[in-house]
Image: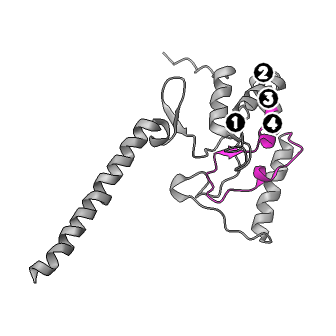
């Protein structure tokens, strides 16, 4: 009996070691050597070296000196532990109400043109990129807040535009977090001074 079961046990153990241990370790090691930035989660750091996010995940930016991402339905918004869309159908009154609210808020902030990605969420709710059109529409607000010209901000945004992969896959895009880091590096925003401590 054991002689008949033994090959199955040995084969199971062998393939478990090969495919469950050796292969994942080898692929992880190759990834760490060949693509260390991506293998570590595409983490981005500020000027002090502190990790502030990932180039793969959207964050909520609401301050006027920054590019704003597309809306998010992930949890309470931009929650990486609750990735997903709203699942509202195209005729759902809740979707129409939210899109109208976002459109009105954009117009109130001085942006006259509304793009699809400025009022719709991605399937994950965590898309880190926006269209170049939406990014450039925000340039005037960012420039005024930072006290620089519209052209200067547009130059920073233009330098961050990523083209189609292999020249034909996907759409041109702008990574919001990377662009905001580039804006901070080029045109730092003066931080408010802390009030003096009472003696």
Q: Nearer the viewer, mark 4 or mark 2?
A: 4
* Residue labelled with disc 1: 63
Q: Are marks 4 and 3 in contact (CB under 8 Å)?
A: yes
Q: Which picture quadrant has residue 183?
A: top right
The 10 Å Cα crowd at callout 3, few under 14, some 14 to 19, many 20 or more, is some
The 10 Å Cα crowd at callout 4, few under 14, some 14 to 19, many 20 or more, is some
Q: Secondary structure at mark 2?
A: loop
Highlighted magenta segment, given as a residue range: 110-139
Q: Is residue 182 in view?
A: yes
Residue under the image location 67 percent in, 44 percent down: 166
Query: What numbered label is drawn on residue 102?
Result: none
* Residue labelled with disc 2: 147
Q: Nearer the N terminus, badge 4 or badge 3?
A: 4
Q: Are marks 2 and 3 in contact (CB under 8 Å)?
A: no
* Residue labelled with disc 3: 154
Q: CA distance from mark 1 to mark 2?
A: 14 Å
Q: Nearer the N terminus, badge 1 or badge 2?
A: 1
Q: Nearer the viewer, mark 1 or mark 3?
A: 3
Q: Quick one: 101 or 32, which is closer to the camera?
A: 32
Give the farthest residue toward the bottom: 1
Query: What numbered label is drawn on residue 136?
Result: 4
């Amino acid at each position: 009996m054991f002689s008949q079961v033994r090959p199955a046990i040995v084969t199971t153990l062998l393939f478990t070691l090969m495919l469950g241990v050796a292969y994942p370790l080898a692929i992880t090691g190759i990834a760490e050597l060949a693509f260390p930035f991506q293998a570590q989660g595409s983490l981005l750091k500020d000027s002090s070296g502190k990790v502030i996010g990932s180039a793969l995940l959207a964050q909520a930016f609401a301050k006027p000196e920054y590019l704003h991402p597309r809306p998010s339905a992930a949890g309470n918004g931009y929650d990486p532990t609750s990735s997903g869309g709203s699942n509202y159908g195209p005729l759902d009154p809740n979707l129409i109400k939210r899109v109208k609210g976002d459109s009105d808020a954009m117009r109130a902030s001085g942006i006259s043109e509304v793009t699809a990605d400025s009022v719709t969420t991605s399937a994950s709710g965590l898309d880190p990129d926006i269209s170049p059109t939406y990014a450039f529409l925000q340039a005037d607000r960012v420039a005024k807040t930072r006290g620089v010209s519209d052209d200067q901000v547009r130059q920073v945004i233009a330098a961050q535009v990523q083209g189609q992969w292999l020249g034909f896959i996907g759409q041109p895009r702008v990574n919001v977090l990377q662009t905001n880091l580039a804006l901070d590096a080029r045109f730092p925003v003066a931080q408010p001074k802390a009030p003096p401590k009472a003696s």
